Image: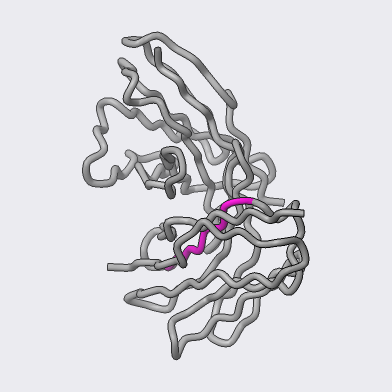
Amino acid sequence: GAVVSQHPSWVICKSGTSVKIECRSLDFQATTMFWYRQFPKQSLMLMATSNEGSKATYEQGVEKDKFLINHASLTLSTLTVTSAHPEDSSFYICSARKQYEQSFGPGTRLTVT
Amino acid sequence: GDSVTQMEGPVTLSEEACLTINCTYTATGYPSLFWYVQYPGEGLQLLLKATKADDKGSNKGFEATYRKETTSFHLEKGSVQVSDSAVYFCALSLNTNAGKSTFGDGTTLTVKP
């Protein structure tokens, strides 16, 4: 149990366009999901906490207007990178909280050209 | 604030060697402790966990014991395999902090045949 999927697994987009990444909890309901960003050979950086039915809580330094998060149901959270730039290229990982544990998605590799 | 400090890598071992990756933490409350493993290009997988002092988490030959007196959660394996090559992250989670996890910087393990 506690399986989390992400879609797409990788995406290439042009600078200035927007990209939506989906995070789904497949076999459980998650009132809380987390979005992380990971640069090569580095640890995970928490971007925001996504709460079902309410606004996301963003970490300091993360632009909420650039990284739009929507948690419309207990099994789906989306991250939209708006007006993407090459510096937004990264590995984005979501996780869904179940009790005191987090289950992680497989990640989405975003490349902005 | 809460923090996790991991042994710096990279760590290179020969097959069947013993592994220890040190992890210490600071936390304002009583955290749950985790080890995650990340294979290249993938998300994080939970390797093992411990929720209270003196608990021992174990999985796939890996073990870690929650030591409250030394605030440590060192990862050990008696005989590593080539397939254990990955990045290992130590993490803590507090129920009082919306379930957020705090991660160490990760330790890259390479096992050579």
Answer whether residue B89 is magenta in the image.
yes
Residue B74 coordinates in the image, percent (x, y)? 55, 75
- Quadrant housing the C terminus of chain A: top left
| In this picture, residue A103 sits left or right of residue A58 | right
Report the residue at 45% width, 62% height from top: B8
What secondary structure do most residues of the magenta stretch adopt? Answer: strand
Between A27 and B67, the one lying in front of the other is B67
- Residue at (43% x, 46% y) in the render: A42
In which quarter of the view is residue A23 placed? top right
Above or below for A73 versus B47: above
Q: Position of residue A32 (x, y in %)?
A: 46, 48
Name the residue located 35 percent from the left edge and 74 percent from the top edge: B27
Q: Is residue A102 left or right of residue A65?
A: right
Rendering coords of residue A52 (x, y %): 44, 41
Along the line of sight, which residue is nearer the eye, A61 or B70? B70
Q: Is residue A54 above or below residue A7?
A: below
In the picture, measured across the screen, residue B97 lies left or right of residue A71, that is: left
Q: Which residues are magenta?
A: B86-94
> Taking B28 as reference, is A88 above or below it?
above
From the viewer's side, name the closer residue of B85 and A6: B85
Tell me, yes or no, whether the highlighted magenta stretch contains residue A62.
Answer: no
Q: Nearer the viewer, residue B106 or A104?
A: B106
The spot of residue A26 in percent (x, y) is: 67, 39
Determine which quarter of the picture holds residue B97: bottom left
**In this figure, what is the number of numbered marks?**
0
Residue at the limit of the structure toward the bottom, as seen here: B69
